[in-house]
């Protein structure tokens, strides 16, 4: 609630220590994060150690002599096995959300989501085929050619994602004309982005949590507000959240994220070009891998890639937290609503059970946003420029 006239809010008043159920919820997810990472790596290792990957490759070779079709058949079976392997942990996450009253989607919808995700994953078949073709024809520079080819693909995916992938899971519509829409448009006009597309998504069909985000690139760039956010928060808090998302929009954080991802991809692929041939020589024979361009080596490739991505998580998280802090500052500069911003952060915390005081190690490792207590304190003390 807004403070009484003349009274200044404090962080302690807005955000008392977390309740035991909030702590338990977050501790469960912290544990599941590391368990899921280890479980995924174990699944890849077993595909190699038990010779399953080599048997799938041999099966694909018997079915067709066309290289692309062999890769397609192999990858379809490989992805299905990994889906089944990860299913227990995915189900655990769903049951946690149901148990705490957050998940509203039915078990059937949850299963359909797994199926949709599996089918979407098959679009990577041409990239996998191209990668192994480059490994065969250019074993020294394959990674550089692959990296160069992935740059336009990354832009293409970012542009198409909001209009091709997102609608497969949720219903999006331009925010209907209403007083809140006019207020949001006025805010966008003040930010110089009056042309910004503002969408509402029916996330209430999946969760009771609150959120908003910026997505897309160029003609598909848009600010998306969850319907749960629009229905649950007062107008000043919605405007504060919109101002934060406007910050992402104006500061071109999607462009920055995409550019940094491309730069990071260069470093990751360079490391893979050194580690993967060594790993095939060291461990390949045990898993039936014939050479570096044998598709049966894909689990080993993905195992190394997963480890590298896991180790670079703190860097990615730090960049994300910095961008989120930039958006917080911009949002307050734009809206001039310090207390509404602070109350919005707290409302998100209360509805989403975010940890107000997470262990610092976890913050540094995988937190994409500053902890809510830090964001709330910043919102209350920051003074916008005149």
Image: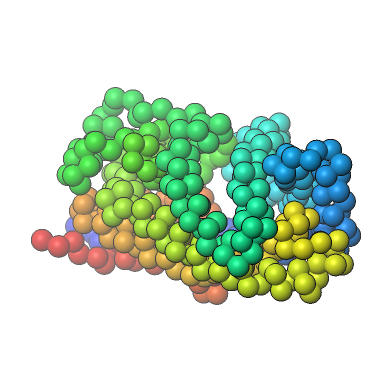
260 left or right of 177 in image: right
Report the front residue among 232 and 260: 260
Give x and y (percent) for residue 75.
73, 45
134 left or right of 87 in image: left
Give x and y (percent) for residue 129.
66, 48
Q: Is residue 61 above or below residue 298?
A: above
Is any atom of residue 379 visible in this view? yes
The outermost residue toward the left is 386
The answer to which image quadrant residue 253 occupies is bottom left
Report the front residue among 29 and 83: 83
334 left or right of 81 in image: left
101 left or right of 210 in image: right
Report the front residue among 109 and 38: 38
Is any atom of residue 308 visible in this view? no
The outermost residue toward the top is 177
Q: Quadrant of the C terminus?
A: bottom left
The outermost residue toward the front is 137
Q: Is residue 141 above or below residue 162?
A: below
The answer to which image quadrant residue 332 occupies is bottom left
Residue plotted at (80% across, 38% down) = 64
Residue plotted at (27% across, 60% down) = 329
The answer to which image quadrant residue 195 occupies is top left
Give x and y (percent) for residue 268.
55, 66
């Amino acid at each position: 609630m807004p403070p009484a006239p003349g009274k200044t809010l404090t962080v302690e008043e807005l955000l008392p220590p977390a309740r035991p159920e909030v702590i338990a919820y977050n501790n469960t997810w912290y544990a599941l994060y590391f368990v899921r990472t280890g479980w995924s790596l174990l699944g890849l290792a077993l595909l190699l150690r038990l010779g399953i990957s080599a048997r799938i490759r041999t099966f694909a070779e018997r079915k067709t002599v066309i290289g692309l079709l062999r890769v397609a058949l192999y990858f379809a079976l490989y992805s299905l096995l990994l889906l089944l392997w990860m299913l227990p942990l995915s189900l655990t996450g769903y049951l946690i959300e149901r148990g705490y009253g957050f998940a509203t989607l039915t078990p059937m919808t949850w299963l359909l989501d797994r199926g949709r995700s599996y089918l979407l994953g098959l679009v990577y078949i041409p990239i996998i085929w191209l990668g192994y073709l480059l490994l065969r024809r250019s074993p020294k520079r394959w990674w550089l050619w692959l990296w160069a080819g992935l740059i336009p693909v990354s832009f293409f995916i970012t542009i198409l994602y909001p209009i091709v992938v997102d609608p497969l899971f949720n219903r999006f519509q331009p925010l209907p004309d209403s007083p809140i829409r006019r207020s949001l448009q006025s805010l966008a006009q003040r930010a110089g982005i009056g042309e910004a597309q503002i969408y509402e998504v029916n996330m209430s069909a999946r969760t009771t949590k609150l959120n908003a985000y910026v997505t897309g690139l160029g003609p598909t760039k848009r600010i998306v507000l969850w319907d749960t956010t629009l229905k649950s928060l007062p107008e000043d808090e919605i405007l504060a959240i919109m101002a934060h998302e406007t910050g992402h929009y104006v500061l071109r954080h999607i462009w920055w994220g995409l550019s940094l991802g491309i730069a990071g991809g260069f470093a990751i692929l360079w490391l893979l070009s050194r580690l993967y041939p060594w790993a095939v020589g060291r461990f390949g024979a045990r898993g039936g891998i014939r050479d570096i361009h044998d598709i049966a080596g894909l689990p080993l490739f993905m195992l190394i890639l997963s480890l590298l991505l896991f180790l670079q998580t703190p860097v990615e998280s730090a960049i994300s937290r910095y961008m989120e802090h930039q958006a917080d500052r911009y949002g307050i500069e734009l809206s001039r609503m310090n207390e509404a911003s602070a109350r919005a952060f707290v409302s998100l915390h209360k509805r989403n059970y975010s940890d107000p005081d997470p262990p610092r190690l976890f913050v540094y490792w995988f937190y994409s946003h500053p902890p809510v207590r830090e964001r709330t304190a910043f919102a209350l003390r920051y003074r916008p420029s005149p």
